[in-house]
Image (spheres, helix red, strand yellow):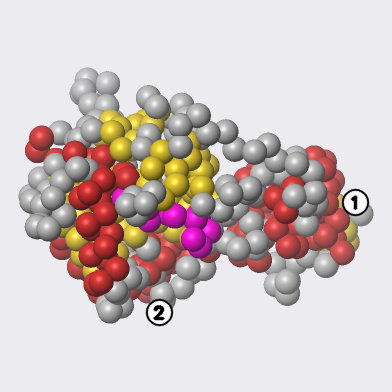
Amino acid sequence: MDYMKEIKEISAEQAIILWQASRLSLSKIYEKAPEILKVQGSVIGTLGNFSASIGKAKSKKTFNVSAIVAATLKNGTVLRYVAELPEEKRKILYVDTEQSHYHCLKVMKRILRLAGLPDDRDNEHLEFLALRKYTPEQRIRIVEQAIYNTPDIGLVIIDGIRDMVYDINSPGESTRIISKLMQWTDDRQIHIHTILHQNKGDENARGHIGTELNNKAETVLLVEKDKSNGDISNVSAMHIRAMDFEPFAFRINGNALPELIEGYRPEAKKPGRPEEEKFDPYKHITEQQHHIALEAAFGLKEEYGYKDLETALVKAYMSVGVKLNHQKAVSLITMLRNKRIIVQENGRKYTFKSDFHY
């Protein structure tokens, strides 16, 4: 499905109205976004913005988000999360797109137990939607109606934003759903937290939608298994607008609840471990990331000398979540040359073959 076809032109009159409404003025007062969620004093969530959790399969992402919801439900502390929702914004909407009703109910009960609340009856501040059986388009419409028609809503969790699009590598669909998140959070002055899987081969969130999340989210939390103990999960800030926080860890206790590990320090990474293996631009960067970054770099300039090319590629690949130092950039350029994705056909200048086959 091509969502770009759904984009409708607006009239000149409508554009003028929106232009005037968008102008800032020093004569007006613009309030700072209320801070509703913190970790050790670092702000990870404000009203009017959205954030995300990413992690590989079985990293306990949903357990971690359960702690975030429990903290906001009790307006207190769970694990390292400290929540403070305004009284008129206490309603929480939890949307699950991939689990059965049975498993969704287990998550709901877990949240209530973490918050110290009864788990045998519904709570007025928590609404849970199980949307597994619907299409991506239906899910978007359902969530939108729930957001705009739920009084006192303050926090929305979308567990499985990947299921809000048909193709995670579609720029049109990705831009559309991220635009929806920005529209919903701004219109309703709420916070939305989403969950997305990581790629198996690297640390990046999956697909074009992952790139968009990294670029637009207020905070991106990384949940990953401890390298030496698979029963322990670490939580750190992969991206955060505010001050960074010290990573923390939790395990699942005998009551099937996430439990903070006090004084935990992750094992230092050692040379030769999988995460320290030699950088391979073909293996560690997806084809989609290469396409987006190279189109961006050569969209600014058609040809580069070597030094300018390196600088441009470092910036372009950073925009898709790939950090390159000098050594990695050299390795990348060598790979691109070997595959004739970039070529030297005009003296010493490098040009880009946009129709390359990866």
Q: Does residue 320 appear anywhere in the picture?
A: no
Residue with the mark numbered 2: 1
Q: Nearer the viewer, residue 49 or 257?
A: 257
Q: Nearer the viewer, residue 238 or 121?
A: 121
Q: Is residue 63 magenta?
A: yes
Q: How far apart, in angstroms, are the residues tagged by discs 1 and 2?
A: 43 Å
Q: Does residue 257 appear anywhere in the picture?
A: yes
Q: Residue 179, how many percent across, how many down?
A: 34, 55
Q: Residue 38, how many percent across, how many down?
A: 34, 32
Q: Please identify the quarter of the rendering in which residue 260 is found.
A: top left
Is 263 situated left or right of 74 in this image?
right
Residue type pointed to by label 2: Met
- Label 2: how many residues lie within 10 Å, few (<14), some (14-19) or many (20+)? few
Residue with the mark numbered 1: 348
Q: Residue furthest right?
A: 347
Q: Quadrant of the C terminus?
A: bottom right
Query: Taking 44 as reference, is 252 above or below it?
Result: below
Query: Taking 140 as reference, is 12 above or below it?
Result: above
Q: Nearer the viewer, residue 29 or 36?
A: 36
What are the residue bounds of the magenta stretch? 55-66
